[in-house]
Image (cartoon, rainbow, N blue to C red):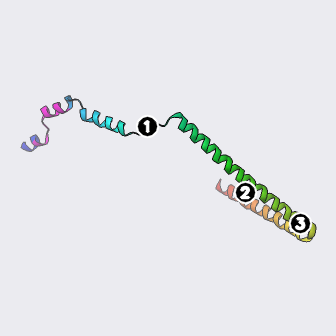
Amino acid sequence: MTDQKRIRPNSEIREKEFSEPPFKLDEAMEQLDSLAPATPNQQWFEQLVLDEQEALRKRYRRELTLFILSALFILSVVLFVMRELPQIFLVLQGAVSVFAFLYSYKETKKQVERL
């Protein structure tokens, strides 16, 4: 019986703990609020958007330039081979056609197996 009294908390102490206002919690919350970083102003966000748009434009121009240069190189090689060596051009066309057909078939088969 004495063990049970030791385990049970004193009701007066318990009432006192719950009746006092939690000033420590309020102070802690105020400290956390003071540590929070300030929200940047609207100009900062607008400048961030403008900087990102400019970076996207530069990247788009670079990719478009590389694409056009690659296309011109491939086209010039194809025209050269077609004009100077038509037999090799026909062989290459056949090989590329067969490769494209086999690749498409293989990918379609994979997609059907996944379903």
Task: Say which amino acid is labelled 1.
Answer: Ala
On the image, which quarter does residue 22 sit in? top left
Residue 55 rendering spot, x and y as whole percentages: 63, 47
Taking depth in this image into account, of 59 and 11 the one nearest to the observer is 59
Upstream in the sequence, badge 1 or badge 2? 1
Q: Magenta region: which residues?
A: 6-17
**Disc 3 designates what residue?**
80
**Disc 2 designates what residue?**
108
Residue at the spot 67% in from the left edge and 49% down from the top edge: 58
The overriding secondary structure of the stretch rendered in magenta is: helix
The residue positioned farthest toward the left in the image shown: 2
Task: Say which amino acid is labelled 3.
Answer: Phe
**Disc 1 designates what residue?**
38
Q: Secondary structure at mark 3?
A: helix
Residue at the spot 82% in from the left edge and 62% down from the top edge: 74
Image position of 4 (left or right of 61): left
Task: Say which amino acid is labelled 2.
Answer: Thr
Residue 75 rendering spot, x and y as whole percentages: 84, 60
- Do the numbered discs 1 and 2 sit on residues whose CB atoms are within 8 Å? no
Q: Secondary structure at mark 2?
A: helix
Mark 2 Cα shell of 10 Å, populated few (<14), some (14-19), many (≥20): few
Label 2 and label 3: CA atoms lie apart by 34 Å
Q: Secondary structure at mark 1?
A: loop
